[in-house]
Every structure is written in structure tokens, then in C-alpha cells.
Image: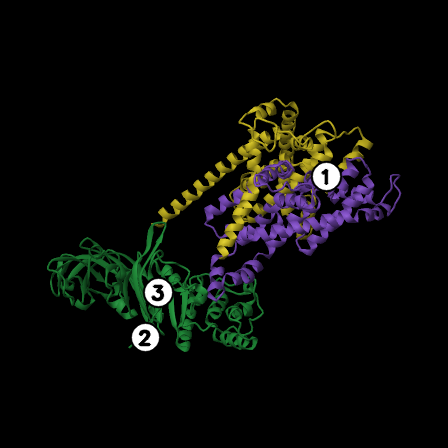
Amino acid sequence: MNKILSRTITSIVIAFLYIPILVLIVFSFNASKSRANFTGFSLRWYEKLFHNDAIMTALLNTIIIAIISSLLATVIGTAAAIGINKMKPITKATIMNVTYIPIINPEIITGVSLMLLFRAFTVYSNFEFGFVSLILAHITFNIPYIIYSIIPKLRQMNPNLVEAAEDLGCNARQAFFKITIPEIMPGVLSGFLMAITYSIDDFIVSYFNSGTTVETLPITIYSMTRKKVSPEINALSTIIFIVILAILIIRNILSNYKLRKEKQEYLTSRS
Amino acid sequence: MENIIISLKNAIVDFDGEQILKNINLDIIDKQFVTLLGPSGCGKTTTLRIIGGFQQMKSGSLYFNNKDITKLPPHKRQVNTVFQKYALFPHLNIYDNIAFGLKIKRLSDKEIKSRVQQTLELVNLIGFEKRSVQSLSGGQQQRVAIARALVNRPKVLLLDEPLGALDLKLRKGMQIELKNIQQELEITFIYVTHDQEEALTMSDTVVVMNDGIIQQIGTPIDIYNEPKNAFVADFIGDSNIIDGIMRKDFLVDFAGNSFTCVDSGFEKDELVDVVIRPEDIKIVPQAQGKLTGVVESVIFKGVHYEMMVESSGYEWKIQSTLHENVGSLIGMNIEPMDIHIMHKMEDKL
Amino acid sequence: MKSKILSIPYIIWMIIFTVIPLGLVIFFAFTTQSGEFTFSNIVAMNDYLDVLFRSIEFSVIATIICLILGLPVSYLISRLARGKQGTMLMIVILPMWINFLLRTYAWMTLLEENGLINRFLGLFNVGPFNLINNSGAVILGMIYNYIPFMILPLYSVMTKIDESVVEAAQDLGCSGFHIITRIILPLSKQGISTGIITVFVPSVSTFIISRMLGGGTNDLIGDIIESQFLGNSYNPHLGSAMALVLMVIVILIMSLFNQFGSEEAVI
């Protein structure tokens, strides 16, 4: 009984999650501009999309901002995590709590608070809203994800490892680069990837801090949705969906393959 | 006549096309301490889970006091389980863990309280009522798991390697305690373990399993002294297993010699497994031995020395209180009643 | 001892870009345009109480529905075989990877008067119904966008519930209903509170969902804040006061669920 009920609810939720996306995909191939009438198959919206300079520029901006901000956030965040890990519990807890603020604070508040700061900058210097403000803002909300994905790795690390390295003749610096960094690398990488994703996906913080000259992709999408009818959005969504689907499927296949291999190794080691 | 409380008939279980249980038939006698013994993957835990109601069979049936309970869900069965890693409820304290089953049955608070107290006394945990699960040691958690099951007064208690996570000393103590509890409460225990010593010390009946098949059912003494096949002989205690030929009743050839034995009923010239316990080989001066061999290694084991001796192409394990130097030539004798003859395993399967 | 120095750049960054901006919000909330201390911005919030209550009401409803739907879904996933859990989880998370503007836009095309749902109903001579630009559409948008935030933390605590604990409960006489109320729910507490926070916080502060699906008549507190900073009624002082109130609501909700600073809350 319970099983049937929870299966039904799960199916409904999954249908609920996917129907709108499927509709977008289907209508991205629509010959006419209509959002409700499928009049025939066509790729014209894809063509239009690739000739839409505003979208292409925004896409480029988004990627540049995401890469620069994630890289800088990774450097600052990794160093920070290693330092924080060595602190006294009270200092550590305080810093971690402040670090937590951009994660849990409503994005609109992160957005307007940074806007107030940058506005103050414009008053007291020749600072202008644009690329720099966007990158600063993105670094700010990216660092916490980096720190929070590295700290657990540092905590799991066997403290004897560094001591063993030193015992075998490494000085502190060598031990750091040969032991600590490789040990926390998975955390650094997953934090970096998270930062890239959040950065590409961010609309709200960017919306308040982009000024009038620079647009990121989500901002362009937003202005397109305001115009009510723009089937290029459907084409864009379809492309994004398929790219993400491909990435996730590949990742899943890889991890399944790894799982199967481990299982096999386990079985052979047992017999 | 002994009363059969649980009867498993023609049980077959598949996992991913692999047969875990190959047609098991098992009768459990009421008020006995029964142990299912075997190496990991032999099907002993699966058998226990069928009785508990957590494992469905592909085919076969299960009777409880002659009533078919094959399809009865676990919460309606009159058996309770002590799980391998205890499976205590982490969000409840000790009292509430133990009282859990009684609360589900909606017993009165007074009744619950007195029964929990009684059970706490039985497992020596008076005073632990308010403690959290996490604050207890492994041995104490073990007692809570036993109490939580026993408080429901099951007809049959199922125990799935309950002592596996404890250290050796604690395990020995708990073995005795469990046996005492079983005798005091006069209920049936079905106990799963891979530890042969544990099985021999505690059980009234031992069921030896391997590869989804029951190899032998018997009292610990039967199982040890009269193993039915080489697997049982090898699994229960140490054994030397040597190829032999049964010349006729009471006469077997092995290791290049003929020996008188106490077994009969084999075909003439049947190839057999000859099983000899290491402690049953007597070391004698070389000239007096029926077999001779060279000592290859000697390890001191406390009560005795364990020697590996090379003789007529076999490595013999011998346990003796006498010490022989490595490299020395010794004679070996075996009494007829210490020679156990078994059909070759391949013939049986 | 030396490695502590490594965190200094971040600490400076944190002070400039996290602490000071929040300080600015508080400063603006209590000052006039000329920089004098005032309570008038806070008092002016009185005019927007209906908006505030609407925001809270909508988000509470959305959170409760997400919880009701999320519990069975997460439990079902957590009891699957390991490999299948990964696949199912991916299916649930996948839509989250698409920008929420696009996801919300998708609902516009479905719900509008001339949209697919009304066309579909039209085939049976039913409707058209007014499906968009009302409170229901806004709540639906919140559920749609944030239900994965409920499922994920629920799943991650539920998958840690050992199957043998569930079996022990069955063994002690629990039927399906009792297993849920006495074992699954109490052991999922942490996930439930994390889920509530991660759905409620973005819901109560959204301004896009209400704008796209609410049609201007269902403004939420987020819309009002946005219009004070970027819209026609430019007034960062009033906007900051509103942001401050929003922050207080969020902090209250979080301390109610006792999660502040808990690292497990991070997805």
C-alpha cells in the first residue's frame, strides 16, 4: 500500500519536473512563433539564436566571469580553508559562521548589499559597475562553496601523513605541496566545479551588480522573458538541457563503471 | 517426542540469478539452541532472514508450530531478531529502545515498565535506562539489542552473528551468558555464526552449511567426531585430508600404507577422503612409526606444538605436547578409530 | 602556526565583501538620504505589511507542499539499490541545472490563457481557466523551482538509515505506518529542517517567480526590494529596511529550526 502510494507520488513529481522542460524542447523546433500551436518542424529558432549578437556576447561574458571568479575564489578559498583548519575552535567557528552567510542569506540581500558597497565605491573613486563589480561579487559568493568543500577533506586527512612526510625528510613546505595539496585536491576540484556552476547560473546577484553595460546570459534571458514571445529561449534551453544531460550521463556512466570495477575486484579478491 | 517449532521445506532463494539457497530442509526443535554454521556466503544468514520474514523465497515454505507462515510479514511473526550490528534506534534512549515492541503492541505503561525492568535485570543493564545508544560500549549495545528482542517474549529468538563485533574476551563472556539466558527462559535460539568454536560451545544442535546446502546436522560432539564429509571435517577444527582407497570394509590404503579403520559400507576400491585430526597423530621414534616424515616447521601454540611434517607427498599438520626439532625424522602412528573415511565430495554433488 | 597566515586574504575579503555590505544595509535602513538617523524607513514598512504577510503565506504553503511531496519521494529513492539511487537522484536534480528563469518561463507557456493546458482542456470544451497571474501560479512556481532542495537533504539523511533498523522495527511489530512515524520521521529530523530552510528562504525572498507568474498583482517582498534599488521608486533606504526585515525573518526561521552554522546544512 505504502509502496504504491510513494511510487505514485514519485512518478507525479518527476512528471511535474519534466513536463515543462519537454514542452520547451518540443516548441524549440516549432516553425511558427506560437507557444501553444505546433505548426511544423523547423530549426529557425536555433539559427536565429546563433545570429543573436546579444545572446552570444552575454554567453561569452558569462563564461569569462565564471572562469575568472572561480579560479580566484579557488585560490583564496583553498588557502583560507587550510588556515582556518589550524585555528582555535572559537575563531574557527566564528569565521565559518560568517563564511556561511553568503550561502544561506537570500540572494537578493547578497545582491543589494554588494550593490550598496559598489555604489559607495563609485562615489569615492572612479569605480564603475561592470565586469569588475560582477567578478568581485561572484568571487564573494563562490569562496564559501570552496571552503566548505575543502574543510571536510582536511578534517578527514590522517594527521600522521604530514608527520610521516616530515619524518622521511620533507620540510614543512615540501610536506605541504607533496602531501596536503594532493590529499585535498578532490575537495578543491569539486569546489571549483561548484563555483563555476553557481557563477554561470547566477541571476539575482548579477542583476543588481552588472550596471547597464555588461550583461550575463541569465540577465539576457530575463530581458527576453519580459518580451513574452521569444522562441529563441526555447532553443537556448534545449541546448543547455542537452549539454547538461550529456555531462551528467557521462559522469554517471563513469561512476557506474568504477563501481562495477570495484565490485569485480572485491569479488575476485574474495575467491 | 520432541516438538518441532519451525520447519523450513524446500527453500530456494535466488539473488541476481545466483542460487543462494539450494533446496534447504530444516526442522528446528523447540527450546533448543540451534546454530547455523558456515563460511560467509554459505546461506546461513539468508536462512535466518527467511525465518524472520525479511527474505522471500523463490519457492518453498515455512511452518511455525505446523502453521504455514511463508507469507506472513515480519511484524506479525512470533519471532524476534538480534541484528548483526545491533540496529538499535539511534533516536531513542535505552529504555525506549527496549520498550519499543511493547509500545507498538499497546501494552499498559505499568506492564511495559515492569517487563523492561525485568529484562534489563536479565542482561545486567539496570541503571542504563536514560542513556543514549551512542554512549554505550559495543558489549552494552549488544545487551540492549538482546533485551529489546527478548522483552517481547518471542517463542524463537534469531541471532545474526551477534558477537561478531566484540573482542575475543567479551565474546567468550557473552557466549556463556547467552547460553544461560536461553536455558533460563526456555525458548528456542537460532544462532548464526561462522565461528566453529562458538558453535560447538553453545549449541544443542549445529547445522553446518556451505554453498547453499546443509552439509550436516548434529550435536556438537557428532559434528566434531563424525564429520560427514571433508568440508565439515575441514571447517570444524583442523584436519589432514588425504586421498585414500577403500580396499574393503575396515581396511583403507593411504600414504602408501594399509590401515585398519572402523568404517564400512563403501564400494570396493572406492576413492575416499581420509580425515585425520592433527591431535590424533601420535609421534613415535622413527623405527616404530607406520609412517615416517621430516619435520618442516614447529610453532609453539601454548597448550601444544603445531608441526608441519612432510611424509609420502603430503604435508601433515600434527599437534603434540612433545617438541621435535626442525629437520628431524619422526615416526607417526594413527589409531583405527581416529581414521575418518568420507565419500569424495564430488560424488555427493 | 604559519599556515594560519594563509587565511588572511580571505578574512580581509570576507570583511570587505560580506560584513561591510551587511553593515551598509543596516546603516541605510536607519538613515535618511542626508545621512541622519531615522526610524522612518522601518515605520514605512507598515504600508507593506500585506506584501510581507503574502510572502510568508505563499512560502509556508510552498514549503509544506514540498515537504509532503518530498518525503515519500526521498524515502523511495533512499531504499533503492545503490546504483539506482544515483540515477534517480540525477533525475531529480537535472532540472535544477537549467537556469530557474528558463524553468519559470516554461510554466508561463503552459499556464497562460492561450497556453498548452488551456488548449488541451479546450479539446474537451472545458475552460479556458485563469491559470496564470494568480497566487496559485506563484506558489506552483516556488514548488517547481525549489522541491529538489527539499528532496536532496531528506534523501541524504534517509539513505543513512540502516535497512536493519527498519527491519528491527518490523521485527518488533511495526507495520508500514508505524515505521514511518516512529522510525523514518524521527531519524530524518535533520533533513526535514534543512529542507524546510532551503525551500523557505529562496521562496520568501523571490522576486522573479512572482513577477513572471503572478502578473503584477501578487507582488512579494522581493519585488518591493528590487523596485527600491533598480525600479522606478528608487529608494535604497526603504529598500534596505525591507531587506533587513527579510533578513530577520530568515534568521528567525533558521533559529527556529536550529541550523545556524551547521555544516551538514550545506548541499
User: Is C235 left, or right, of B18 in this rendering?
Assistant: right
The residue under label 3 is: B62
- Any idea which chain is the yellow one in this picture? A
- State left or right for residue C102 relative to residue B112: right
Q: Colour of chain B?
A: green
Asked if A192 appears above or below A267 in the picture, the reply is: above
Tag 2–tag 1 contact (CB < 8 Å): no
Closest to the observer: C203 or B189? C203
Are circles 3 and 1 on residues that touch, CB within 8 Å?
no
Q: Which residue is mark 1?
A: A111
> What's the mark number on residue C157?
none
Which of discs 3 and 1 lies nearer the camera? The answer is: 3
Residue pictured at 73% horizontal, 44% vertical: C220
Q: CA distance from mark 2 to mark 3?
A: 16 Å
Quarter of the image containing the N terminus of chain B? bottom left
Which chain is home to disc 1? A
**Mark pair 2, 1: CA separation:** 77 Å
Q: Is residue B235 left or right of residue A14?
A: left
**What is the chain letter for disc 2?**
B
The chain whose colour is purple is C
Q: Which residue is mark 2?
A: B3
Q: Secondary structure at mark 1?
A: helix
